[in-house]
Image (spheres, grey):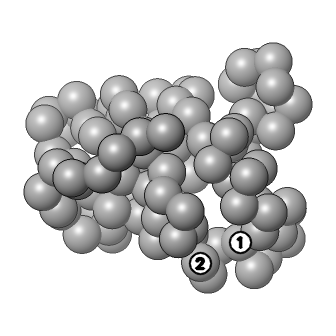
Amino acid sequence: MNYKVIQVIPTRDFKVYIYFIDGKIKLFNARELIQKGVFKQLQDIDIFMNTCTVLNDTLAWDLSGNYDPTECLDIDPITLYNECPEVEEPDIAIS
C-alpha cells in the first residue's frame, strides 16, 4: 500500500484534512498532539495553520520556513492512514 500524502488542509479547530495518493481523505485531530513535547508550539493557531504542509510525503509543520524535511515536525503517514477516520471532501473555503 502506498501511504504517500499529496495534500493537507488545516482548519482553525486544530484538525487537518489529509489527502492520500490512493484518493482517500482522512481527518487528523491534533488537539491531543499539541499538548505534548515539541508539538506544544503548534498551540498557536497561526503557527498551526501557516506552517502546515506536506514534507517527507506526510503531514508536517515547517517551523523553520525553509522546507527542509530534516527540520520539520511530521507524523508517520502509516499511522495517519490507519488511525484517522476516512471522510468526504470538506466543503470549506480556503482563505
Q: Name the residue under label 2.
A: 31
Q: How many labels does the image show?
A: 2
Image coordinates for residue 56, horizontal then vertical, percent: 56, 28
Q: Name the residue under label 1.
A: 34
Instruction: Please rate how many residues cluster around mark 1, counting C-alpha atoms within 10 Å: few if below 14, some from 14 to 19, many from 20.
Output: some
Q: Is residue 4 left or right of residue 73?
A: left
Quadrant in the rendering for residue 24 = top left
Image coordinates for residue 1, horizontal then vertical, percent: 19, 38
Q: Which of 67 and 69 is in front in this view?
A: 67
Compared to 4, does 24 lie above or below? below
Compared to 66, does 27 lie above or below? below
Element under disc 2? loop
Rounded to the nearest angstrom, the CA distance separating label 1 from label 2 is 6 Å
Q: Which of 3 and 23 is in front in this view?
A: 23
The label shown at residue 77 is none
Which residue appears at 26% of the width and 38% of the height? 20
Q: Nearer the viewer, residue 2 or 87?
A: 87
Which residue appears at 85% of the width and 61% of the height? 41
Mark 1 vs 2: CB contact within 8 A: yes
Which residue appears at 24% of the width and 69% of the height? 85
Image coordinates for residue 42, horizontal then vertical, percent: 76, 60
Which residue appears at 33% of the width and 62% of the height? 27
Q: What residue type is labelled 1?
A: Ile
